Amino acid sequence: YVVLDEVDRMLDMGFIDDVEEILGHIFTAGNYYYYYYYYY
């Protein structure tokens, strides 16, 4: 499991590409999925 805390703040600040790159390096083999959960 991977938990990224405060991702909503990172996405609000424009770090979507960085978050996707981090997840891409972690999950290089096999199928995976991830989702963004926004709580406002």
Image (cartoon, rainbow, N blue to C red):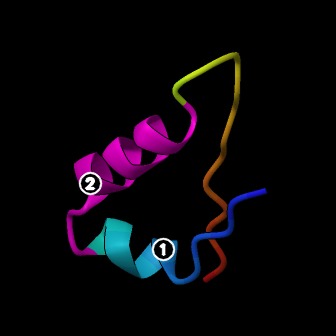
**Mark 2: which amino acid?**
Asp
Residue that appears at 57% across and 34% down: 27
Label 2 or label 1, whichever comes before in sequence order = 1
Q: Toward which corner of the image does residue 19 lie, by quadrant?
A: bottom left
Q: Is residue 14 positioned above or below 33 on the image? A: below
In the rendered image, which quarter is residue 14 located in?
A: bottom left
At mark 2, the secondary structure is helix
Q: Is residue 2 left or right of residue 11?
A: right
Give the residue pinned by disc 1.
8
Principal secondary structure, stretch drawn in magenta: helix
Please name whichever residue, 32 or 9, is drawn nearer the observer in this view of the structure.
32
Q: Quadrant of the N terminus?
A: bottom right
Left or right of 3 in this view: 5: left
Which residues are drawn in magenta? 13-27
> In the rendered image of this protein, does residue 39 appear above or below residue 25?
below
On the image, the x and y values in percent for residue 20 come to 38, 44
Residue 30 is a magenta residue:
no
The amino acid type found where label 1 is placed reads Asp
Q: Are marks 2 and 1 in contact (CB under 8 Å)?
A: no
Seen from the viewer's position, the closer of residues 31 and 16 is 31
Image quarter in which the C terminus is found: bottom right
- Is 11 positioned to the left or the right of 23 in the image? left
* Crowd rating for badge 2 (residues with CA inside 10 Å; few <14, some 14–19, many 20+): few
Say if the magenta span includes residue 25.
Answer: yes
Q: Residue furthest front?
A: 29
**Residue neighbourhood size for the residue with mark 1, other residues' Cα within 10 Å, grouped as few (<14), some (14–19), many (≥20):** some
To which residue does mark 2 refer?
18
Residue depicted at 52% across the width and 44% down the height: 26
* Front residue of this view, candidates 31 and 40: 31
Using the image as rendered, state which of residue 36 and residue 30 is in the foreground. 30
Q: Residue furthest left?
A: 14
